[in-house]
Amino acid sequence: MKKNGKSKLSPWPYVRNNKRRMASLILSLAAFAVMIYMVCYCIDASCKPFYEVCLNKYDHLNEIAINYGDRINEKIQKEKEQSNGKMSDKEYNRRFWEEAYKEFAKDKEKLKKLDHVDDVLMYKNGYVNYQSIAGNYGHVVYLFESIDDIKTYMNHIDLKIIKGRMPEKRGEIVVDKKIAKNQGDHLLDKLAEGYEVVGYTDTDDYACFGYAVEDENNGWELVLTDKRVSVKSDIEKLGFPVLYAYDYDSAEKDLDTAIGSLENVKYVFTIVTNIVLSLCIIVVLSFHISDRHNEWCLISSIGFSKIEVYVMAFKELLIGFVIALIVGLVSGIGCAYYMDRTVMENLGISIDLFSVDAIVLIISMYILMLALCQIPLFVNLNKITTIDEIE
């Protein structure tokens, strides 16, 4: 009713007296929010772990390969000739890396004097696999030639053993617990024979390292830095021929190239999913609005204007959307938590439960749907016929 020329129309009587209808509307919208949140969560589980496992370690180190071959091969080749062909390939490789470490020991002090360089270690590459929902990655295991180098590496990244012990003899390695869970019985499949896990860490770097077996046939330089920086150009300025250099920027570039198509699939899938679900919700909302037509005719007949009816109807929708948003987000985060504990944690995949991107997307879609609801709302308001008009 109207008093003193002021509208007394309120959305709350409808909300209180039509609990089933409002509950249906709220549950439909909340289900939409949960589905979008979980779609975003699962897509993130396909992409984000790679960025963590591939990039985090380069905040405080560079991987460099200096070409010692030209300096050493000629010397070892002469030794092989002097042995009358008795030097085996295994012995040739052993002598090569023996000489390479001697050359590195001469160069190490020069390298340590570079800006932002704390220390430089020589290591051999090993790999363990890491798998997300939609792909896999060969993660480097730093295999050192001495216990002192292992301790230097651990101290640089403030690394702690959470289970087991640090390596004490050749072939012993420490791995990140997330990668251990991720790979299970296949953890050592990509490493050479002779390795065993003696300890576990839990770091943002997914750190894996150990004491190299004697037959590892490669050598790299691990430049430990005090911040995210590229040292390749500085090393080349000292006259060292760099065959290979990997830092944060180059790793990020390679990663973007490797999973760029996956990111495109992510965006297309998200857009298509949003459109389909939004259309379904719009249809539900249209029926909800159409069901109010007779009631709006009656309200207009007792003296309320279409503007007043519109404001009331808009507030009813707004109440439903706000409640649904709260219920949907809480339920979505709850579902993500359940999936994290029952599935992702067992796979060693770490994903943030609270996704700002997903929340922004859901709010944006809610605003869009609320805006689109104005179409059936205005259409039905224009169809309002009062009792006087009918007579």
Image (cartoon, grey):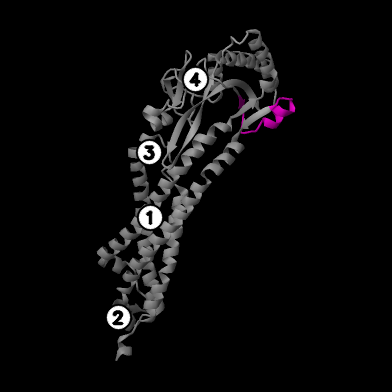
In depth, the one of 158 and 100 nearer the eye is: 100
- Mark closer to the observer (4, 2): 4
Q: Quadrant of residue 315?
A: bottom left
- Mark closer to the observer (3, 2): 3
Element type at mark 1: helix
Task: State which quarter of the image contains the C terminus.
Answer: bottom left
Q: Which residue is mark 2?
A: 298
Report whether 70 appears left or right of 85.
right
- Mark closer to the observer (1, 4): 4
Q: Which residue is mark 3?
A: 344
Q: Which residue is mark 1?
A: 33
First of labels 3, 4 by sequence position: 4
Q: Residue at x 43, y 36 (%)?
A: 131
Q: Residue at x 45, y 40 (%)?
A: 135
Figure label count: 4
Q: Residue at x 66, y 25 (%)?
A: 66
Q: Position of residue 384 (x, y in %)?
A: 35, 81
In depth, the one of 81 and 125 nearer the eye is: 81
First of labels 3, 1 by sequence position: 1
Question: Contact (CB < 8 A) between labels 3 and 2?
Answer: no
Residue type for callout 2 = Leu
How far apart are the alpha carbons under marks 3 and 1? 21 Å
Query: From the viewer's perspective, is residue 323 above or below residue 165?
Result: below
Q: Residue at x 42, y 64 (%)?
A: 369
